[in-house]
Image: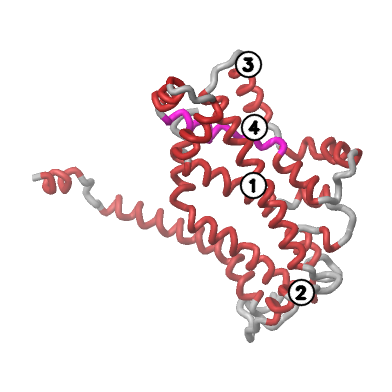
Amino acid sequence: MSNAREFRSKPRLTPARALRITCRHVVLALLAIFWLIPIVWLVVTSFGIDKGPNLSTFFPKAYTLDHYRAILAPGGDSVNQFPRWFLNTFIIAVFTCLISTLFVLMVAYAMSCMRFKARKPLMNIAIILNLFPGFLSMIAVYFILKEIGLTNSLTGLVIVYSAGSGMGYLIAKGFFDTISKSLRESAYLEGANEFTVFWRIIIPLSKPIIVYTVINAFLAPWMDFVLASLMLNSGVSAQKTVALGLFSMVDKVNRNNYFAQFCAGGVIVSIPISILFVIMQKFYVEGITGGSVKG
């Protein structure tokens, strides 16, 4: 009986509805193809035999792994120091991820579970400040860090990426709002303080939003170019991040000799992020949906 009811509740596939569905999927397929074409071209170019950009054919005439060997070679040359760039970016991303995740979770807990007089004004101020693009403050931040000698250093970049991360608390706060208050109240009755409640009760129940926060905090410095180019302006190749180093490979001087290595570097850089996202995709989606229930 239930199967018959479900069958009757399904809308009939009329010719007009079938046409709309077909058109919708055709449009989505075309958009997917247009989106994938540059990525596919970058990948196949990284395996091609040409050092520079090959614009005459989409697929290379022959394939080789020489560009991957060259870009991963220890020491490199004056232009290609990819292993060092990768290490710099990884160090920045890891420390930024740890600090930013801690800031976001602590601020979200304070705004969701604690009550104090300035709570709502602070929340409104944080929301208003988030409406302004971050690059508006870049010049001021640069001169402040220059005065204390933290430009052209990995420490300065970690500070820039993580200092204001606490203002991105809103989604984590929405997730914390869904956790039952009775759990915290029971802990308070047992004599637990705020740190114990946060560390022993809230954090173990918040794995999805923690994963979401960790991935976002890791991606920000991993893919950033603007702030890195402002802070690391000494011109020393060994101090660059992956984004700055790969960009230097495609300038007018180096493009014809290093473009294929640039493509190979782009493929290598995407691998850690792809693996991280595939492994944690379930928790990432749960963190987004859980954090959007309440604001």
Disc 1 packing (10 Å; few <14; some 14–19; many ≥20): many
Q: Quadrant of residue 22?
A: bottom left
Mark carried by residue 167: 4
The extreme left residue here reads: 1
Please give the name of the residue rendered at 56% of the width and 32% of the height, measured from the top-left corner.
Answer: 170
- Residue holding disc 1: 97
Distance in Å between CA atoms under marks 4 and 3: 15 Å
Which residue is at 79% across, 47% downward? 155
Q: Magenta stretch: residue 44 in it?
A: no
Q: Is residue 176 rendered magenta in the image?
A: yes
Q: Which residues are magenta?
A: 163-179
Can you say whether 67 is above or below 24 in the image? below
Give the alpha-carbon distance from disc 1 to disc 4, as whole Å.
15 Å
Q: How many marks?
A: 4
Q: Assess whether mark 4 and mark 2 are in contact (beta carbons under 8 angstroms).
A: no
Residue 118: image tag: 3
Secondary structure under the numbered disc 3 in the rendered image: loop
Residue sitting at 56 percent across and 43 percent down?
213
Task: Tell me: residue 187, above or below residue 2.
Answer: above
Look at mark 2 in the image and give the residue it sits on.
74
Residue 136 x %, y %: 77, 36
Pick whichever of labels 1 and 4 is earlier in the sequence: 1
Q: From mark 3 to mark 2, how far is it between C-alphas?
A: 54 Å
